[in-house]
Amino acid sequence: VLVPDDDDPPGMEFYGMPVFKYEDLYIGQLWAYQTPPEEPQIRFAGSIHVQLAGSRDGRVWERLGGRKPFIPNGPPGSIDHWEAMTAQSPVVMGDELWFYYSGTSRDHSGTLDPAANGRSGIGRAVMRLDGFVSADAGYGGGELITPTIRFEGNRLELNLDTGGGGSVRVEIQDAYGQPIPGYTEEDAPFICGNSVRLPVSWETNQDVSALSGKPIRLRFVMQDCKLYAFQFTKGSPADS
């Protein structure tokens, strides 16, 4: 379902892709083999790292995360310097996802990395919940507007990391892109923090139940932050 293309470096091949269902997505962990550019004539003297792919139906797949390594190879001498190949599904532990993978101290031709002293083993990569990719804004700021959506619930929560000085404000618009009174950018205080479930409010109001089931858009006004996900929940102010 996937092959390297002209945007991949020379010498890349795909060796496998464990797939698991996550919410309404299929997530693929693509084992990407890369021949060292300094040794293109050596057929299997390369390494394997993990990239991400995603699909809505399990048939049409898209490369995610800018094709960057999701689980990269470690430094020389580490057990995963040459190969990292994941198990099928991560383990959900609280607000984290744990990915287990095998690591080897030999390149794909079987040549031993002398700095690793023959070691191989099982590695664990830890990621925040829903943290596969993020919409990022720099110091200059940026905006993100969703397509028209409908939701159920009475509260909006963000999976967000604003770092030391970043922020985000959320505006709710109607299906035509017009701000809804009471939920405008001017009504929204700055949200700062690092959490998988930061509640959104407008003035002192968190309740969005009056808009439940209606077509709306969300406009995120961001500065120096990473937005991983958002969700509507059925909660109460006491849950915050």
Image (cartoon, rainbow, N blue to C red):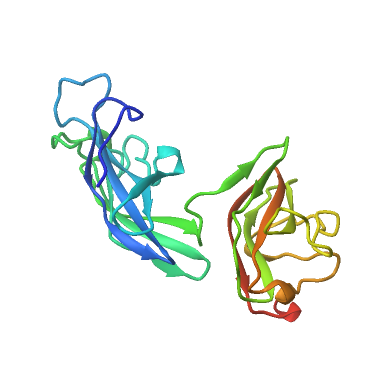
Residue 39: give x, y in percent of width and height. Answer: 21, 20
Compared to 78, does 202 lie above or below? below
Q: Left or right of 140: which side holds 18?
A: left
Compared to 222, does 196 lie above or below? below
Compared to 52, does 214 lie above or below? below
As drawn, which residue projects farthest toward the front? Answer: 176
Taking the spot 69% from the left edge, 76% from the top edge, the residue there is: 154
Residue 163 or 148: which is nearer the viewer? 148
Compared to 52, does 87 lie above or below? below
Residue 207 or 43: which is nearer the viewer? 207
User: Residue 239 occupies which quadrant of the picture?
Assistant: bottom right
User: Residue 42 occupies which quadrant of the picture?
Assistant: top left
Do we see residue 44 in this rendering? yes
Q: Left or right of 147: which side holds 68?
A: left
Residue 104: give x, y in percent of width and height. Answer: 23, 45
| Label total for image | 0
Residue 93: give x, y in percent of width and height. Answer: 46, 69
Residue 108 or 117: which is nearer the viewer? 108
Q: Left or right of 166: which side holds 115?
A: left
